[in-house]
Image: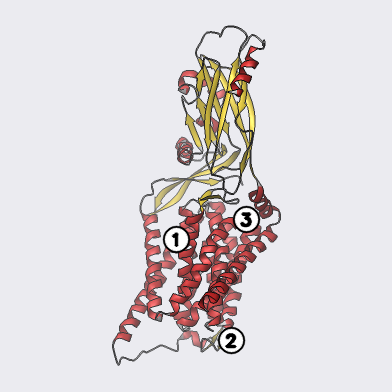
Amino acid sequence: MLRLLSLLLLLAQPAAAREEIVLGLSQDSVAITATFEGSEILVFGAIRRDSQPPPGKLGVIVTVAGPDTPIVVRRKDRRLGIWVNVDDVKIDAAPSFYAVASSAPLGDILRASEDLRNRITLDQAIREVGTNVLDSRSFSRALIRIREENGLYQTLESSVDVSRDTLFETRIAMPANLTEGFYVTRILLTRDGNVVDTYETTIPVKKVGLERWLYNLAHEQAMLYGLMSLAIAIASGWLASAAFSLLRR
Amino acid sequence: MQIYLPIAEVSVNAFLLLGLGGIVGILSGMFGVGGGFLMTPLLFFIGIPPAVAVATEANQIVASSFSGVLAHLKRKTVDLRMGTVLLVGGLVGAALGVVVFNYLRSLGQVDLLVKLCYVVFLGVIGALMFVESLNAIRKSRKPGAKITRRKHNWIHNLPFKMKFRVSGLYISVIPPLLVGVTVGILAAIMGVGGGFIMVPAMIYLLGMPTKVVVGTSLFQIIFVTAFTTMLHATTNYTVDIVLAVLLLVGGVIGAQIGTRIGVKMKAEQLRILLAIMVLVVCFKLGLDLLIEPMELYSIGAGGH
């Protein structure tokens, strides 16, 4: 309620003769702890305008994108009776996480040319080049399909609630198998399919505490980390043996 | 209870891993196998990245083997001398294996190689062992039939002979060295201790008594897998210590229970059970290669 009030106050201030986005996030960072089970981010905000809303259909699109990584998509085929990886397509940059939420079906509130320019839909968010197979499209579609099953790619049409043409909010669920990095969050405002304003912010996703420490140790002090793993293994092996011989007495 | 694994970067159920570790630990103590040939495919199945599964499994085997070997040492069923010879070969093999593993990973065929290795080795060894132990059981049931054992074959004519008192053998060091190298390579590639190859090789190729074989196999597995763990930790950064701890807590307890079960059983029974288990895993993996997979596509890390 307080949030809404402060937003309404912001709206009351005079602004330029155009529509602008004012944004809030339920949390400005995601901490991956040992018991991390995923996280839900509430993205909410308001559209600030000084005069009557201009004509045309209003659309709000929210995207959250994890860090881009290069990946290889491989396809199996039957060779000599067994299924082996035969073809592969290198994808230069695919976000490790991508969610796109919109206030209406994307086709209704976004022109294809705007989608191309702003890289909004999943198809646009994935950049593929360097193909050596004919049907490289089916590889990027497979990537989307697999990651959608894992909850890493989400297309949430009509999941942004817009009330009184000014306030909007949506929830984006981030799964437990997140990778670290800066998650770029964009809010795009459209009128008749044209983007009239964008707002961009980043949500850092970081391992914290023990997770952070172990990860750093594994990469920076690999030898020490390896020895530590072995020491734990030997110690627990010995402990179990000692405990059992005590039990037998 | 979900736990986020810092290196694997996935979230898994802690109790599931404890249980898996326990079951595999029991088998480990009973048969002298590390249990990696069961655990690694299981880890793939629950979504651990293959590279992390292979490296971490090696670390877990160190723990369950150590736990098992302590139990065997108390019964004096470990041939330390034979173990050391096997170990020398094993370390050479493990170093070669990590090089091969990294090369194949860059080709994207590591999955296939690992699976083919499993199917071929499990199939051949499982079948041979099954037939042999079935014959042994039949013979022991027939009263009056004498147990004949071929004591001398070509292996006994090789040079560099050495006495292995605990096993009651006087043979050349070349066969145990070669067995060690082979097992070492497989250990690094497949994320296994190689016990399921080592145990039959010691029984049938080297002619060691079954009771000594289990402890000796575990003894050398400790060192080979410890070495593999270090290599993976320093070259690939793929050992997940949280995953390892969850698996090994179950594993070390299981190994103690398994050793006690193993002692109460006859050698032939032990061998035929191991053979059946090996064949079942082989059959399952073989089927996966032959049947069209549900998802033809897979995602791998790019960027060379």
Instruction: Determine which of the numbered discs, if any, sits on residue B236 in the image.
Output: 3
State the SS at label 1: helix
Q: Nearer the viewer, mark 3 or mark 2?
A: 3
Q: Label 2 is placed on what type of residue?
A: Phe
Disc 2 crowd, CA 10 A, few/some/many (<14, 14-19, 20+):
few
Residue found at the very far top of the displayed protein: A52
Q: Judging from the image, what secondary structure is the residue with disc 3 in?
A: loop
Q: Which residue is pictured at 71% across the width and 56% down the height?
A: A221
Contact, CB < 8 Å: mark 1 with mark 2? no
Q: State the residue lying farthest toward the left.
A: B142
Residue B134 percent across, percent down from the top left: 33, 78
| Residue B90 placement (x, y as % from top left) | 58, 72
Secondary structure beneath dot 2 equals: loop
Q: Between residues A51 and B213, which one lies in front from this camera angle?
A: A51
Q: CA distance from mark 1 to mark 2?
A: 35 Å
Side of A48 where B254 appears, left or right? left
**Which residue does the image show at 61% across and 29% down from the upper left?**
A25
Name the residue type under label 3. Answer: Asn
Same chain? Circles 3 and 1: yes
Mark 1 — residue?
A: B116
Looking at the image, tell me whether mark 1 or mark 2 is earlier in sequence order. 1
Task: Please name which of the two marks, 3 or 1, marks the residue nearer to the observer.
Answer: 3
Asked if the residue under mark 1 is in contact with the one under mark 3, i.e. CB atoms within 8 Å, the reply is no
Residue B179 visible to an observer of this rendering:
no
* Residue B125, quarter of picture: bottom left
Relative to the observer, which residue lies in front, B37 or A81? Answer: B37
Question: What chain does mark 1 sit on?
Answer: B
Residue B160, numbered label = 2
